[in-house]
Image (cartoon, rainbow, N blue to C red):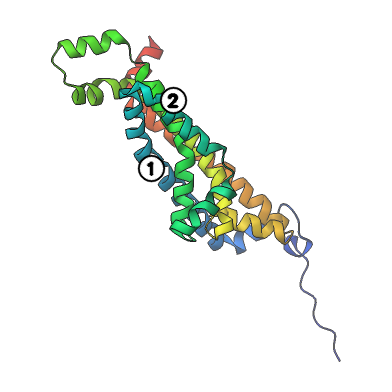
């Protein structure tokens, strides 16, 4: 009986931390997981903005409930992610809806505060001048207050986005965690290259998204660049 052929030794068989062959052989899986991760992050932050904007305006308009809105959104962030997802599962089921909704709720803490801080930071004399020029409340908000508050709001969006990149990995418990699925699988099987590559991709994704948001902010607020030069 001839002995079974042994596979050639390489970084995969040695289970090295740094292994280029892992990237080349698993490029499809990595790309799919990265796109899923990106989709979860974008959807959850957009959902957070949709919920945070009216909440912030409501809290700003009615000062008596300001503390309730801020306190409630802050309280959500104190709930452990596993517990929050478990609370949502009976309502939304297993899958992407639960992950996106949970991360969207987590982002409320940051987004509500940044919107409120940005709007409250608009100088009173600017509001008075705009009102004196005949600006009604909606026009004042969208044409004057929001543009001036945009740098603060964008700072909150950047923090919420980077936070969502990290928290998305927790979605692996629902089999919808993007890179987190590969990260957890690699950790469970002690697949070193998979753990390192997926962790590095999470960091890279956070950095790239943050830089993109900085670029968007610069485009949307050209007056801040002019002020910096002056």
In percent of width and height, residue 202 lies at: 57, 46
Q: Which mark is residue 132?
A: none
**SS under mark 1:** helix
Q: Is residue 225 above or below residue 33?
A: above
Residue under pointer 2: 67
Q: In the image, 171: left or right of 51?
A: right
Q: In the image, 203: left or right of 1?
A: left
CB atoms of marks 1 and 2 within 8 Å: no
In percent of width and height, residue 220 lies at: 32, 28
Give the quadrant of residue 226: top left
In percent of width and height, residue 53 lies at: 34, 33
Q: Earlier along the polypeptide chain: callout 1 or callout 2? A: 1
Answer whether residue 151 is visible to the viewer in this image. no
**SS under mark 2:** helix
Quarter of the image containing the C terminus? top left
10 Å neighbourhood of mark 2: few (<14), some, or many (≥20)? few
- Name the residue at 58% across, 56% down: 172
Q: Is residue 168 above or below residue 219?
A: below
Q: Which mark is residue 46?
A: 1
Viewer-nearest residue: 27 or 98: 98
- Name the residue at 47% across, 60% down: 93
- Name the residue at 57% across, 37% down: 78
In percent of width and height, residue 94 lies at: 49, 61
Q: Is residue 46 above or below residue 144?
A: below
Q: Is residue 119 above or below residue 82?
A: above
Viewer-nearest residue: 68 or 48: 68
């Amino acid at each position: 009986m001839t002995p079974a052929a042994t596979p050639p030794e390489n970084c995969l068989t040695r289970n090295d931390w740094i292994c280029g062959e892992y990237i080349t052989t698993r490029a499809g899986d990595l790309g799919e997981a990265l796109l899923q991760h990106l989709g979860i992050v974008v959807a959850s932050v957009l959902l957070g903005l949709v919920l945070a904007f009216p909440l912030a305006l409501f809290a700003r308009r009615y000062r008596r409930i300001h503390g309730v809105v801020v306190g409630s959104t802050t309280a959500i962030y104190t709930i452990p992610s596993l517990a929050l997802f478990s609370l949502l599962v009976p309502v939304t089921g297993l899958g992407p809806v639960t992950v996106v909704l949970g991360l969207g709720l987590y982002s409320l803490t940051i987004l509500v505060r940044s919107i409120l801080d940005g709007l409250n930071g608009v100088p009173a004399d600017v509001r008075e001048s705009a009102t004196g020029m005949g600006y009604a409340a909606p026009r004042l908000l969208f044409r004057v207050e929001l543009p001036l508050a945009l740098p603060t709001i964008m700072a909150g969006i950047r923090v919420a986005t980077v936070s969502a990149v990290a928290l998305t990995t927790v979605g692996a418990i629902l089999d919808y965690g993007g890179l987190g699925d590969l990260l957890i699988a690699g950790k469970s099987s002690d697949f070193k290259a998979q753990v390192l590559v997926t962790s590095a991709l999470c960091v890279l994704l956070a950095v790239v998204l943050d830089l993109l948001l900085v670029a968007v902010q610069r485009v949307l607020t050209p007056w801040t660049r002019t002020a910096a030069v002056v």
